[in-house]
Image (cartoon, rainbow, N blue to C red):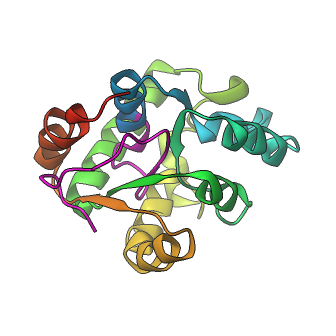
Amino acid sequence: MLSADDPLGFSPHRVVVAGTTGVGKTTLARRLARLWDLEHTELDSLFHGPGWTPRPEFLDDVRRVASGERWVSEWNYFGAGGGQLLGERADLAVWLDLPRRVARTRLLRRTVRRRIRREPLWNGNTEPPLWTVFRDPDHILRWEMRTHGTWRERMPRVSADYDLPVVRLTRARDVDRWLAGPAAEVAP
């Protein structure tokens, strides 16, 4: 595994950004898209249909993204098959392995902001009322509590399964250091 200071040694064209809910996968994917001139597709926008229902076209849409030559996306939805499709074509994984307190704080701030502003998300969805965290076992805040450690178990296996180099970033400041250093040194 590579750290925030290790050179990449190649110019990535198909990148997956892994990590638990709230660590900043989409933010980093957008930054990499700009830095390396890649197309960014937010996987949540492909998965969530109206009323938070899974879109039947999800896997076809992920196949279209994965078949491209230059892209970056969040690496999730393994249960729905999306993660596997992206992993098969990716040439780099960036793993945001940030502490729970960072993920939790970011997720809470984002969820409250989206709910108060009623920000439209994917396909007309908005964050549910905040009190639903107490009764909905799949509320995003409860989901994070249940799944935070998932990538620590998953990453060694999936990086080997897909033969992917992995950049592991364990602190928020590592992300900026990596983007300004090794990531900036590779040509798009």
Instruction: Return the x and y of residue 62 as percentages of the image width and height.
Output: 73, 43
Q: Identify whether 157 is placed above or below 42.
A: below
Answer whether residue 139 is magenta in the image: no
Instruction: Return the x and y of residue 156 as percentages of the image width and height.
Output: 41, 78
Residue 71 placement: quadrant = top right
Residue at figure coordinates x 56%, y 75% from the top left = 161
Q: What type of secondary structure mainly makes up the magenta span?
A: loop
Q: Identify whether 19 is placed above or below 29.
A: below
Residue at figure coordinates x 16%, y 37% from the top left = 176
Residue 6 placement: quadrant = bottom left
Instruction: Return the x and y of residue 15 as percentages of the image width and height.
Output: 48, 45
Residue 126 placement: quadrant = top right
The answer to whether 130 appears left or right of 103 in the picture is right
- Give the residues in magenta: 1-26
Q: Nearer the viewer, residue 55 or 126?
A: 55
> Which quadrant would the C terminus be assigned to in this image?
top left
Residue 54 in view here: no
Q: Identify whether 130 is placed above or below 148.
A: above
Residue 156 in view here: yes
Instruction: Return the x and y of residue 119 as percentages of the image width and height.
Output: 52, 21
Q: Nearer the viewer, residue 45 or 157?
A: 157
Q: Nearer the viewer, residue 145 or 41?
A: 41
Answer whether residue 13 is magenta in the image: yes
